[in-house]
Image (cartoon, rainbow, N blue to C red):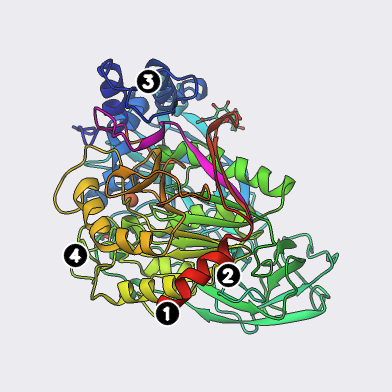
């Protein structure tokens, strides 16, 4: 049985909502229950529409079935029994491509056609093999679609589908697979096109098919704050280490034609920016990871990661840059720009985007990203926001790519976010899907990272951590002080992380940063029915409250941000489960807790009934959060990812002299 039932998330979601006529939208303090048009039936329709949205692209019933039954895996590649794959090449089956070269590893489209399949079936599928000579009984494909995605296939045994490729830093091939995912057989692999202009001979079976013209093209450019407002880190990825990887940058845009007709640079010294920052280069290998898919079927060489530090930046200034290697063959990236950090001051106004649990999906409809289709809209909308408004910082509070050990999926994710992350620092906290693995030192010891145990995450996002696998940090940004901590590491009194949080909280000068926001992946308060021990939402939230709630109250934390539960939820100003009346000066007397786990992953509809009295807003739709923060106002808008409607909007206010007064009262106790 090729398609046995596995965790049936989407199906479950639809059923539980349809069967949930009694689901409460009462709850005394619920001022808004955002479901776009407010009805449970509408949500059910939309969730269903999402699982069905392949119809328009002629996706078959079988594919829909697959989507319904496997979306809950987060990473559908896990459905494939890689070690059961048999290679039985059938010389009658041919795969052809409409082009042989991948010129830009950033989105060329390929038409893949095949013929000669006798007895075609619905469980035949097309796989992208990366690298092109990978043994599919050892390495999972990077992408896949059902062959019956072209309806002609099941009648004629031939068909064609379009795929968009990004660079996996290697040549790639397409394979035709039969027998679904449990007893798969590879029956054909694409061959070099005969009329190739290539000087290289067309070698044996499994040889080069799609030649990547520039394996060292700079990929996955992204930024990170260091904790010092006058600095910015730039990270990118190439196949080889190169010799002098660097960032060229300055306050003005610089024209540079890096095309020599083949897609990479030639014949010049590179773009002429006034400043250069040399990069440190590192890689991680299978030996650095902990097990599972990460060290077996999911591993594809992840290339080299370059990190350069730009220093001496003027505050709130736009800088332009490209990354590359003047002595290498990879050429230079396009020009990107970012806005440097504002001064740390209550007089600054900052614009910030925030998400959690986003993941990635494929614009060509490849099915390995099928759960996180909404992440495409979320990303696209944030890119549009960033282009039109002064957003200069993005927070992603855990569950980043959901690669879960399949390293090509990190490549997909980093590609998807590049337009955002190359434009503003992309600051992250770890989620269970980045960090957790038995025996690897995380708090829960569950298998959610697929064996990555935080290594792929940490190497790809150089946050200002105090040390290796200490995934917590703090930084000031304009009028706001952030603490990002790890719910995946011990956080209770006596732990190193707890001490860090205490010291960070004590050190905040509220005259400079009146606003204090703390973020960690798993929620402190959440209206979820998941009470599983040890890592269900309820026991974990209790643990976090025991560890942190008094501290947060004592240090006047204004807001917490979290994810993990794939919904949007906002509490009243809350302490020990009780909404707190405002202070005399009108400020909130306790933190507002916000769950923003609705950026892309399948929605969590396991909401408690009745709703808790402290829940002020519940949103069961996908989207992201944007914030505008100034001395006296922290404005939060929650934007739906389909048409930009507001799922929620709220503000916290403080008198202009609040910070001064606060410090007068509290400095004594420092
Ligand atoms: C692929 O790997 C499997 C399992 O390691 C091995 O038995 C098989 O011979 C390999 N196939 C090829 C073509 O190398
Ligand atoms: C792909 O190419 C084949 C052969 O040229 C053509 O018949 C088919 O329509 C193309 N398919 C797509 C999806 O563009
Ligand atoms: C994405 O946004 C478009 C409109 O901008 C909307 O039509 C579409 O339904 C959205 N897709 C999803 C999956 O929400
Ligand atoms: Fe999570």
Rendered position, 540 above or below 455: above
Instruction: Look at discs 1 and 3 and give the one toward the viewer.
Output: 1
Residue furthest to the left: 533
Residue located at (36% from left, 21% from top): 61
Answer with mark 1 or mark 2, whichever residue precedes in sequence: 2
Residue 133: % across, % down: 42, 60
Instruction: Write down the residue under mark 1.
Output: 466
Q: Nearer the viewer, mark 2 or mark 3?
A: 2
Residue closer to the observer: 318 or 255: 318
Helix, strand or loop at mark 1: loop
Q: Are marks 1 and 4 in contact (CB under 8 Å)?
A: no
Question: Which of the marked residues, 2 or 4, is nearer the chain's N terminus?
Answer: 2
Q: Is residue 569 magenta?
A: no
Asked if residue 623 is among those painted magenta in the image, a careful observer would answer yes
Q: Are marks 2 and 3 in contact (CB under 8 Å)?
A: no
x, y percent for residue 534: 15, 54
Q: Is residue 203 visible?
A: no
Viewer-closest of 183 and 407? 407
How far, Cα to Cα, is label 4 from label 3?
A: 36 Å
Mark 1 crowdedness (10 Å alpha carbons): few <14, some 14-19, many ≥20: few
Residue 524 percent across, percent down from the top left: 31, 51
Q: Are marks 4 and 3 in contact (CB under 8 Å)?
A: no
Q: Who is closer to the viewer here, 311 or 154?
A: 311
Residue picked out by circle 3: 44
The answer to whether mark 1 and mark 3 are in CB contact below 8 A is: no
Which quadrant of the figure has residue 202? Answer: bottom right
Whole-angstrom CA distance, mark 1 to mark 4, is 23 Å
Relative side of 406 to 110, left or right: left
> Could you tell me how many numbered marks the image carries?
4
Residue 386 seen = yes
User: Residue 385 lies in what quarter of the image?
Assistant: top right
């Amino acid at each position: 049985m090729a398609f046995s039932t596995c965790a049936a998330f989407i199906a479950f979601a639809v059923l539980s909502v349809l069967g949930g006529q009694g689901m409460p939208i009462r709850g005394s303090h619920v001022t808004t229950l955002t479901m776009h048009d407010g009805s449970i039936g509408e949500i059910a329709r939309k969730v269903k529409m999402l699982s069905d949205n392949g119809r328009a692209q002629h996706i078959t019933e079988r594919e829909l079935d697959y989507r319904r039954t496997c979306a809950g895996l987060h990473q559908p590649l896990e459905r494939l029994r890689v070690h059961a794959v048999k290679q039985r090449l059938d010389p009658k089956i041919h795969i052809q491509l409409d082009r042989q070269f991948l010129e830009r590893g950033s989105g060329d489209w390929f038409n893949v056609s095949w013929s000669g399949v006798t007895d075609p079936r619905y469980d035949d599928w097309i796989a992208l093999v990366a690298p092109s000579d990978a043994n599919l009984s050892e390495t999972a494909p990077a992408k896949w679609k059902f062959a019956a995605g072209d309806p002609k296939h099941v009648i004629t045994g031939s068909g064609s589908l379009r795929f968009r490729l990004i660079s996996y830093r290697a040549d790639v091939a397409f394979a035709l697979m039969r027998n679904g995912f449990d007893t798969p057989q590879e029956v054909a692999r694409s061959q070099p096109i005969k009329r190739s202009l290539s000087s290289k001979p067309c070698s044996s079976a499994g040889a080069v098919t799609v030649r990547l013209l520039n394996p060292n093209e700079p990929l996955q450019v992204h930024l990170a704050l260091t904790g010092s407002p006058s600095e910015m880190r730039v990270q990118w990825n190439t196949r080889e280490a190169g010799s002098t990887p660097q960032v060229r940058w300055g306050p003005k845009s610089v024209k540079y034609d890096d095309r020599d007709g083949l897609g990479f640079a030639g014949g010049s010294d590179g773009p002429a920016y006034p400043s250069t920052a040399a990069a440190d280069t590192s890689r991680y290998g299978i030996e650095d990871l902990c097990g599972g898919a990460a060290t077996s079927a999911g591993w594809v060489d992840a290339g080299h990661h370059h990190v350069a530090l730009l220093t001496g930046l003027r505050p709130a200034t736009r800088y332009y840059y490209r990354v590359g290697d003047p002595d290498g063959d990879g050429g230079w990236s396009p020009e990107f720009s970012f806005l440097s950090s504002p001064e740390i001051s209550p007089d600054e106004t900052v614009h910030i985007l925030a998400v959690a649990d986003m993941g990635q999906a494929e614009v060509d409809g490849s099915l390995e990203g099928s759960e996180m289709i909404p992440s495409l809209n979320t990303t696209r909308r944030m890119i549009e926001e960033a282009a039109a408004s002064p957003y200069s910082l993005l927070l992603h509070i855990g569950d980043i790519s959901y690669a879960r050990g399949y390293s090509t999926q990190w490549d997909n994710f980093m590609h998807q976010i590049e337009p955002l992350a190359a434009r503003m620092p992309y600051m992250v906290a770890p989620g269970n899907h980045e960090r957790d693995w038995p025996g690897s030192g995380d708090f829960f010891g569950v298998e959610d990272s697929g064996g990555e145990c935080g290594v792929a995450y940490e190497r790809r996002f150089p946050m200002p951590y105090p040390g290796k696998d200490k995934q917590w940090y703090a930084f000031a940004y304009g009028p706001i002080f952030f603490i990002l901590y790890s719910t995946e590491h011990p956080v209770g009194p006596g732990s190193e992380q707890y001490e860090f949080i205490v010291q960070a909280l004590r050190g905040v000068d509220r005259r400079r940063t009146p606003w204090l926001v703390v973020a960690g992946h798993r929620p402190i308060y959440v209206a979820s029915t998941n009470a599983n021990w040890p890592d269900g939402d309820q026991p974990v939230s209790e643990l976090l409250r025991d560890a942190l709630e008094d501290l947060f109250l004592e240090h006047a934390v204004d807001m917490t941000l979290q994810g993990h539960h794939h919904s949007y939820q906002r509490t009243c100003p809350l302490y020990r489960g009780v909404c707190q009346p405002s202070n005399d000066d009108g400020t909130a007397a306790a933190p507002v807790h916000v769950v923003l786990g609705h950026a892309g992953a399948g929605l969590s509809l396991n909401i408690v009934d009745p709703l808790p009295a402290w829940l002020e807003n519940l949103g069961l739709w996908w989207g992201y959060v944007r914030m505008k923060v100034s001395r006296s106002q922290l404005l939060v808008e929650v934007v739906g990812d389909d048409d930009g409607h507001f799922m929620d909007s709220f503000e916290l206010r403080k008198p202009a002299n609040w910070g001064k007064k606060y410090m007068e009262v509290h400095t004594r106790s420092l």
